[in-house]
Image (cartoon, grey):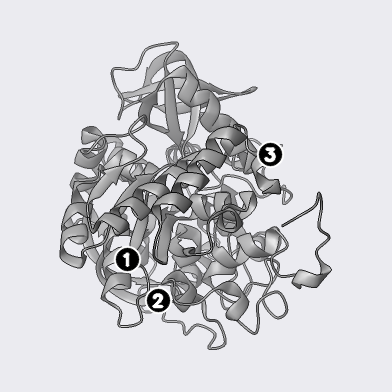
């Protein structure tokens, strides 16, 4: 129970854990979808705090992690072009492709820039009219409204030297894939809070009904996660399978109407490949046909690049909750955050990177116990 | 994945037809787009993801979310370089130190 003291309000955490223990009569496997939740769970030791019958498995919700290797290689092929200024969120710079990462390309003279907002690309485009500005538009639904606005504003302002390398993915199709797998172990989900702040949660209701699984939209603070787990466990114990909202202080059922509207004007649903998992039908966005001239894959002729992923890596199984990082022979040895082999090690929100960052790669015997029992 | 950071709107303005704001996150002030929460006023708290406000929250929620993100080292996107209008910033171009601008 040493972890409890570290929580801002240990009393509430202890009550939630006691309540989970009181309610739970049978084992349950619960997946948190969001990488931010994974990070919080591992950092705060929430999985160790729960009764042994409640197992948390870590889902595919890290956009950096699930961007397929071939898309990284496409980004690198474009970033190496002398006429290109390649703009990206900082997380993507150290993701290795088949030959180095964006830092390598920068060190070799490529013009690679970290941006805070996609709109920064418009300023860079106006300041560099002789250059082609390419933005690496990755992300889940939370990021889509920002990336959509870049495309929309580029078109509205007639700025022609901007294009987007789009690798957008969506949460509900990933949940459907996990639940459809014959290997599936997941009985309930903590849904992604900030994704639902944009999208709302009505699209999760058919999933809960069809697969008969509880889905509780949850925040990422330790108390949020404990409360979300309690709500899932209650549903499992009572035989219910509903969408519930733990995070109602931030979001409602319908999300952000303005954001959804612009996303629908700019993007359309398409099949997407997920690193470690493979192609999931209708699981992402691409630019609508009217905006296809903003598509960097077409503008720079890289659409045909296809890359195979390392065979030893089991990140696909980890992303689907079938295996844990420790099950991988490469975890913490051949595969580390500095030399990641696969999806779940490439960003801090990936399950393998989170386990590594908080010492979970060490043998239990080498950990020093602090403060008595447990 | 996709965590948004709460901040306080200190100024609103228009640019290129977009409703914009200067938003304070702790000691850092950054520009954010308010197009998706157009009813926002100075003094309101908003959740901002990669330079776009996606939701409004109350002060208490903003405070605890900010602290939780700080505990998780999830504030580094705020360290991403500032791009000025039309003016290249040689002080950050070519720097290859800290990775910032987290998307997730």
Which residue was labeled with disc 1? A174
Q: Say which of A232 and A318 sits in front.
A: A232
Cα separation, mark 3 vs mark 1, equals 36 Å
Q: Which mark is residue A277?
A: 2
Label 2 environment density (alpha carbons within 10 Å; few <14, some 14–19, many ≥20): many
Q: Position of residue A201 (x, y in %)?
A: 24, 46
Give the residue displayed 63% in from the left and 51% down from the top: A43
**Chain designation of label 1:** A
Name which residue lies at 23% across and 41% down.
A260
Evaluate whether residue A252 shows in this view: yes
Secondary structure category for the residue under label 1: helix
Tell me which label, 3 or 1, sits earlier in the chain: 3
Q: Which residue is found at the position 41% from the left and 72% from the top?
A: A320
Q: Which of the two discs, 2 and 3, labels the residue nearer the N terminus?
A: 3
Image location of residue A231, percent across then percent down = 35, 47
- Look at the picture and state if A201 lies above or below A169: above
**Badges 3 and 1, same chain:** yes
């Amino acid at each position: 129970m040493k972890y409890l003291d570290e929580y801002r309000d240990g009393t509430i955490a202890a009550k939630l854990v006691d309540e989970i223990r009181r309610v739970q009569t049978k084992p349950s496997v619960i997946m948190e979808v969001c990488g931010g939740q994974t990070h919080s769970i591992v950092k705060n030791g929430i999985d160790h705090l729960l009764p042994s019958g409640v197992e948390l498995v870590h889902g595919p919700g890290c956009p950096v992690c699930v961007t397929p290797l071939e898309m990284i290689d496409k980004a690198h092929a474009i970033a190496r072009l002398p006429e290109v200024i390649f703009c990206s969120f900082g997380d993507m710079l150290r993701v290795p492709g088949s030959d180095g990462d964006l830092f390598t390309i920068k060190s070799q003279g490529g013009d690679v820039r970290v941006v805070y907002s996609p709109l920064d690309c418009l300023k860079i485009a106006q300041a560099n009219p002789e250059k082609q500005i390419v933005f690496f538009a990755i992300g889940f639904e939370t990021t889509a409204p920002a990336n959509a606005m870049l495309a929309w504003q580029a078109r509205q302002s007639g700025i022609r030297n901007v294009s987007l390398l789009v690798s957008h993915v969506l949460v509900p199709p990933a949940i459907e894939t996990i639940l459809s797998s014959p290997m599936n172990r997941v009985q309930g989900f903590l849904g992604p809070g900030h994704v639902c702040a944009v999208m709302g949660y009505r699209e999760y209701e058919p999933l809960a009904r069809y697969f008969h699984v509880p889905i509780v939209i949850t925040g990422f603070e330790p108390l949020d996660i404990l409360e979300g787990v309690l709500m899932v466990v209650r549903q499992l114990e009572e035989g219910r399978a509903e969408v519930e909202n733990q995070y109602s202080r931030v979001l409602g059922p319908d999300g952000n109407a303005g954001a959804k509207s612009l996303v629908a004007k700019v993007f359309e649903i398409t099949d997407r490949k997920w690193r470690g998992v493979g192609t999931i039908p209708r699981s992402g966005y691409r630019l609508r046909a009217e905006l296809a001239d903003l598509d960097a894959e077409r503008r720079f002729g890289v659409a045909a690049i296809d890359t195979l992923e390392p065979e030893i890596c089991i990140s696909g199984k980890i992303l689907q909750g079938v295996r844990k990082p420790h099950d991988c022979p490469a975890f913490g040895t051949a595969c580390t955050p500095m030399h990641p082999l696969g999806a779940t090690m490439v960003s801090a929100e990936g399950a393998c990177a989170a386990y590594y960052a908080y010492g979970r790669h060490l043998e239990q015997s080498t950990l020093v116990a602090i403060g008595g029992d447990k | 994945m996709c965590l948004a950071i709460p901040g306080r709107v200190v100024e609103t303005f228009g640019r290129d037809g977009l409703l914009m704001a200067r938003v304070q996150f702790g000691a850092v002030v950054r520009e954010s787009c308010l197009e998706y929460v157009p009813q926002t006023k100075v003094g309101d708290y908003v959740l901002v993801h990669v330079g776009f406000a996606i939701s409004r929250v109350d002060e208490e929620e903003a405070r605890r979310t900010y602290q939780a993100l700080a505990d998780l080292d999830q504030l580094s996107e705020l360290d991403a370089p500032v791009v000025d209008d039309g003016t290249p910033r040689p002080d950050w171009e070519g720097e290859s130190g800290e990775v910032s601008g987290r998307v997730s």
